Image: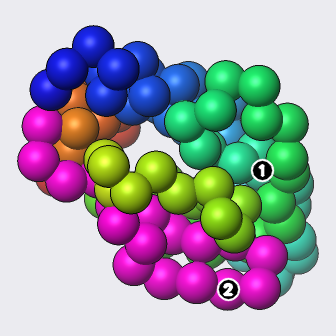
């Protein structure tokens, strides 16, 4: 993994850490299907887009360390693949060295 790929992956893991705090607060309200506001976990450090999804959906994303939730069109083809699309968010998965790096930085012990 080159320095650019590493920096991009670090940006995404930073947004993931912020969303972990959002999810902790959302989980206190149960799993009633309410939409909560999460941040786009794309590699752009200046991105401020917010995504609405249930905490159950976010939990499904977080079940895999190499997966991130991004706004439509915010994927980075050089380091990830879109594996699911909805109208308001896309699910991306890192591959190769960036997947390993994302797993190393995951605050959860998933995989």
Q: Residue at x 31, y 28 (%)?
A: 5
Residue 75 part of the magenta-drawn span:
no
Q: Check disc 2 and report the residue beneath it.
A: 86
Left/right placement of residue 7 relative to residue 69 reads: left
Q: Earlier in the sequence, mark 2 or mark 1?
A: 1
- The answer to which image quadrant residue 35 occupies is bottom right
Q: Which mark is residue 98?
A: none
Q: Nearer the viewer, residue 48 or 76?
A: 76
Indicate the position of residue 52 as horizontal and vertical percent values: 84, 66
Q: Residue at x 21, y 44 (%)?
A: 99
Q: How many marks?
A: 2
Indicate the position of residue 85 as horizontal and vertical percent values: 58, 84
- The answer to which image quadrant residue 83 occupies is bottom left
| 94 vs 10: above or below | below
Q: Check disc 1 and report the residue beneath it.
A: 38
- Classify mark 2: helix, strand or loop: loop
Q: Residues within 10 Å of mark 2 (few under 14, many from 20)?
A: few
Report if the CB atoms under discs 2 and 1 are less than 8 Å apart: no
The reply to whether residue 65 is in sight is no
- The answer to which image quadrant residue 98 occupies is top left
Q: Residue at x 85, y 36 (%)?
A: 48
| 47 vs 52: above or below | above
Q: Residues within 10 Å of mark 1 (few under 14, many from 20)?
A: many
| Alpha carbons under labels 2 and 1: distance apart | 15 Å
> In the image, which residues are magenta?
81-97
Q: Which of the colour schemes (rainbow, by chain, secondary structure, one colour) is used? A: rainbow
Indicate the position of residue 90 as horizontal and vertical percent values: 60, 71
Q: Nearer the viewer, residue 2 or 42?
A: 2
């Amino acid at each position: 993994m080159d320095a650019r790929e590493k920096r991009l992956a670090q940006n995404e893991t930073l947004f993931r850490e912020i969303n972990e705090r959002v999810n902790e607060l959302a989980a206190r309200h149960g799993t009633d299907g309410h939409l909560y506001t999460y941040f786009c976990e794309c590699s752009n450090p200046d991105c401020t887009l917010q995504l609405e999804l249930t905490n159950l959906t976010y939990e499904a994303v977080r079940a895999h360390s190499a997966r991130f939730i991004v706004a439509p069109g915010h994927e980075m083809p050089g380091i990830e693949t879109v594996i699911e699309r909805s109208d308001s968010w896309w699910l991306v998965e890192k591959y190769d060295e960036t997947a390993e790096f994302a797993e190393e930085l995951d605050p959860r012990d998933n995989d």
